[in-house]
Image (spheres, rainbow, N blue to C red):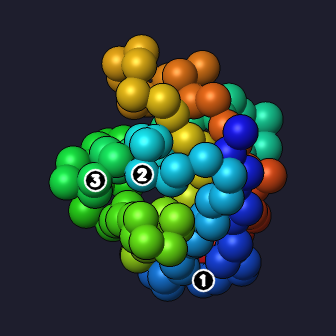
Amino acid sequence: QVQLVESGGGLVQAGGSLRLSCAASGRTFSNYTMGWFRQGVGTEREFVAAISRTGASTTYADPVKGRFTISRDNAKATVYLQMNTLKPEDTAVYYCAAKNPRPAGLTRVELYAYWGQGTQVTVSS
């Protein structure tokens, strides 16, 4: 089992920045690919970003490319999501998730075995 706890959400004006953190405990953090997802009101949970076990490879959803940066610190068992130039459409509950190496793939919700409780991000216009 892996326990994930997100933090860092809040209310920010459009154009501002937030940094989300996700602290992991339980099994060895570096064994897992980590992802961030988000879910707005009345929408399905969607992929935001993912990072490989070593941090060498990252993948982003098109709406956040160039604005968001995912990173991880395996020594601290923490994954981060730096969000810049925030837009009102970024408003959502943000979740971090942990994925085993298999099966392959990064963007589908069902590929991730462990989830945090989520943190609310609200961007005002």
Earlier along the polypeptide chain: callout 3 or callout 1?
Answer: 1
**Residue named by callout 1:** 13
Res 8 seen here = yes
Number of the label disc, if any, that sits on residue 30: 2
Left or right: 50, with 78 as reference point: left
Nearest to the observer: residue 76 or residue 47 = 76
Q: Amino acid at mark 1?
A: Gln
Secondary structure category for the residue under label 1: strand
Pinpoint residue 67: horizontal percent, then vertical percent: 33, 66
Residue at image point 25% right, 62% down:
66
Between the residue at mark 3 and the residue at mark 2, the CA separation in whole angstroms equals: 7 Å
Eyeballing the image, is 98 above or below 103?
below
Q: Position of residue 108 (x, y in %)?
A: 50, 23
Q: Read off the residue under disc 3.
A: 54
At x 21% / y 48%, what residue is drawn?
A: 57
**Mark 3: which secondary structure?**
loop
Q: Amino acid at mark 3?
A: Thr
> Among all residues in the image, which is located at the extreme top?
103
State the CA–CA distance, disc 3 to disc 1: 33 Å
